[in-house]
Image (cartoon, helix red, strand yellow):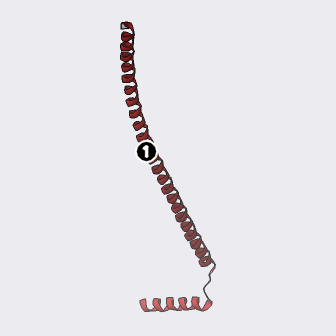
Amino acid sequence: MLSACNAAADELKASRILIDALEIENAALQVRLETERRANALLNELNETRRAETEALRATVAAKNETIAAKDAALAAQDKLIDQLKTKKRSVWSRIGDILLGVGVAAIIK
């Protein structure tokens, strides 16, 4: 009977050691779980930040493209106006008026 009690006491002692080891392991797993949760939260925040940055870059590119299109349209309008001014001829009466004005100014200056 004494040996049975000693065996039971040894088993109880071993059980307590195993229980302590399991509690330590459980605490370590809890810490790891919390660390993983924080890391996951940070990764989600990073992902959202990158999405917002990507959307902002898309908007910037769209605005740049609109600006380029507006500049191209303005240049095309200027080219068209230049072509119109190159081909526009003044009337004969307008030219005669300029000549007479020049003669009048020359007469006044002399």
Rendered position, 77 above or below 7: below
Assign the N terminus to one quadrant of the image: top left
Image location of residue 56, percent across then percent down? 48, 57
Q: Amino acid at mark 1?
A: Ala
Element at label 1: helix
Image location of residue 96, percent across then percent down? 58, 91
Characterize the local packing of mark 1: few (<14), some (14-19) or many (20 or more) Cα atoms within 10 angstroms: few
The residue drawn where x is 50% and y is 88% is 102
Rendered position, 76 above or below 3: below
The residue drawn where x is 36% and y is 23% is 20
Furthest-right residue in this view = 87
The residue drawn where x is 55% and y is 61% is 65
Q: Which residue is mark 1?
A: 41
Judging depth in this view, the residue of 68 and 110 nearest the camera is: 68
Q: Is residue 99 left or right of residue 11?
A: right
Q: Quadrant of residue 72?
A: bottom right
Residue 110 appears in the rendering: no
User: How many labels, in total?
Assistant: 1
Q: Quadrant of residue 13?
A: top left
